[in-house]
Amino acid sequence: MDNSDVSKALYEIADYLELQGVAFKPQAYRKAARNIEMLPGEIADLLNEDRLGEIPGVGKAIADKITELMKTGHLEYLEELRAKIPQGVIDLLSIPEIGPKTAMVLYRQLGIEDVDSLKKAIFEHRLSGLKGFGVKTEERILRGIRVFESRGGRIMLGNAFHSANKLIDYLRSKHADATVSVAGSLRRMKETIGDIDILVATSKPGEIMESFVSYDSVEDILAQGDTKSSVRLINGIQVDLRAVLESSYGAALQYFTGSKEHNVELRKLAISKEMKISEYGLFDRVSDELVAGADEAEVYDSLGLQYIPPELRENRGEIEVAMKRELPMLIEYDDLLGDLHCHTEWSDASGTIEEILRKASEHGYEYVGITDHSKSLRIARGLSEERLRKQIDVIHSLREETGGPFLLAGSEVDVLEDGKLDYPNEILEQLDYAIMSIHSKFNLDERSMTERIVTAMSNDVVKIFAHPTGRIIGQRLPYTFDLEKVIESAIDQDVALEINSFPERLDLNDTNVRRAVDAGAKIAIGSDAHDPSQLAYTRFGIATARRGWAKKSDVMNTLPLDTLRKMWGI
Ligand code: DGT
Ligand code: CA
Ligand code: CA
Ligand code: ZN
């Protein structure tokens, strides 16, 4: 039970009271919740020292509730509120256009319990039957739902990364003397991000907070203080900014990078070593002397640990391994020597082969593979056999003309239902390599799907299996197949499993990468660029590889061109 758990419970109470039409009390609960969120220390310490009343906005009644919740893990008052109204009704309040009165009418009269049942009711035009509601109201609420959904859930790493970098550049440009870093799940490069966390070390927190809340893209200031401020950007993303002194910057960076689960383990380790750790530093338990604070690496070192890169901090065994100093040397962000998965305007992308080549050169690559779609994939304007032959010729002649990265003639070939590839062998043989992909017939049973994949892999021209599970974040689940068997077959057949770097895909994901790498499979990190600028997406693929504990040597496209060509016999 920590600060955020307590404030969450208080916010929930506030929402319930608001739904019931209670005056003033909701604001009081929210104020207390906000102040607890902003507490610099642990609320557990205040409870132990009987000092809850010192938190602004926390009077006797709220203090009693906090005490009950923290001591028993249960709060009777909140349970009673929950018993009266389903929690989903609270979510309705987050939809623009819906206030407490409307939410309660929808719940009482139509039994609408959450956003999904509200959508259903609108599609069935059940709202327009209510007094004071019309077709116009339905449309308005539906638009509100769209807005709610676009900002409600977690955001794709790619979007968050972009927004955060712009904001960080802005803060750095205005405060050259401050140290600014990203923290939280974004620093860990998780595939989706709840909110962006930024940490600054500064002796003038007030000034940086002022710049932060007056940033161009800020839509809403949720909180502003000297140690923490929160805003919502116009794109709906929430950003938390925390300011600390240089002397505790390393400890704060460690703490706010998380994950929470990693931190919990680290705290246990500190205790076992007669130390205590917080966002202020690592301290000797007895003397209270500071052991480490300014430098993050020193925090890990002082705990007897090898430095743990942020991408590994998920409490997936990294602390134990770091204790033995056996963490893998992860692939680095500049280790790729080429990109083997790129599309052009020959199929469904924008940009020419020459433009891809130019971008590849900017990335410092030795080689780049053009892999447009195959003929069956009509929606992606897949290349007919004739067009593919022509493209191969074009690639060969461009190869002669231009310096820079070496152009490889590839193809992203669909795997048909029976495991055959979408082009006859005589054409496939003219390619330098093929990537196999499943883009259709996702609903086979596990055995047939596994068989289909394994059959396709046995074709010699296939060097990479693209986006192996087919999942699309927030849109499509992976198809059903036996990943263990596919990994085995990939190893046997010398086929690399791709980490598709498209932010919506990141497939294989981190945990599957780890399974594949542990088993000894090779990985290929492809951008799947559908525009030359998207070659930069490999950054997210590399992040996923790192989160899957992959080393440089696990990744096929860190190999120099010569080695690759020898390996492929081209
Ligand atoms: P997110 O935003 O859901 O993608 O995930 P995070 O990991 O960025 O989580 P967030 O934004 O709630 O907090 C940032 C970091 O701050 C988190 O990774 C660890 C640390 N942190 C926040 N609250 C707590 C807490 O109550 N206890 C501990 N031990 N750490 C916390
Ligand atoms: Ca976060
Ligand atoms: Ca946060
Ligand atoms: Zn592709």
Image: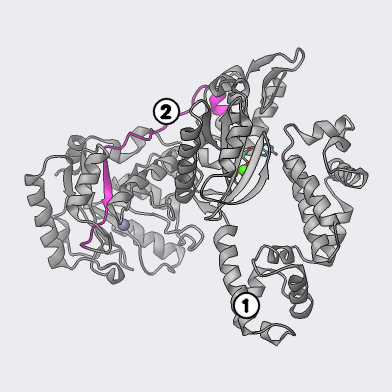
Q: Which image quarter: residue 334?
A: top left
Q: For this rendering, which residue is in front, 448 or 59?
A: 59
Q: Nearer the viewer, residue 114 or 196?
A: 196
Q: Is mark 1 within 8 Å of ligand 1?
A: no
Residue drawn 60% across the image and 33% down it: 207
SS assignment at label 2? loop
**Left or right of residue 503, residue 81 in this image:** right
Helix, strand or loop at disc 1?
Answer: helix
In the depicted structure, whether residue 477 falls above or below residue 492: below
For residue 45, say whether it is visible.
Answer: yes
Packing grade of label 2 (10 A; few <14, some 14-19, many >=20) is few
Visible residue check, residue 197: no
* Residue under the point 83% across and 38% down: 55
Q: Which residue is mark 1?
A: 120
Give neighbour class at mark 1: few <14, some 14-19, many 20+ (Cα, 10 Å).
Answer: few
Q: Which residues are magenta?
A: 320-346
Residue 23 appears left or right of 368: right
Residue at label 2? Answer: 329
Task: Give the residue displayed 68% in from the left and 38% down from the top.
Answer: 225
Lower sequence index among marks 2 and 1: 1
Q: Indicate whether residue 96 is drawn in magenta.
A: no
Counting from the top left corner in percent of width and height, residue 464 is at 30, 50
Q: Is 542 drawn above or below residue 20 in the view shown?
A: above
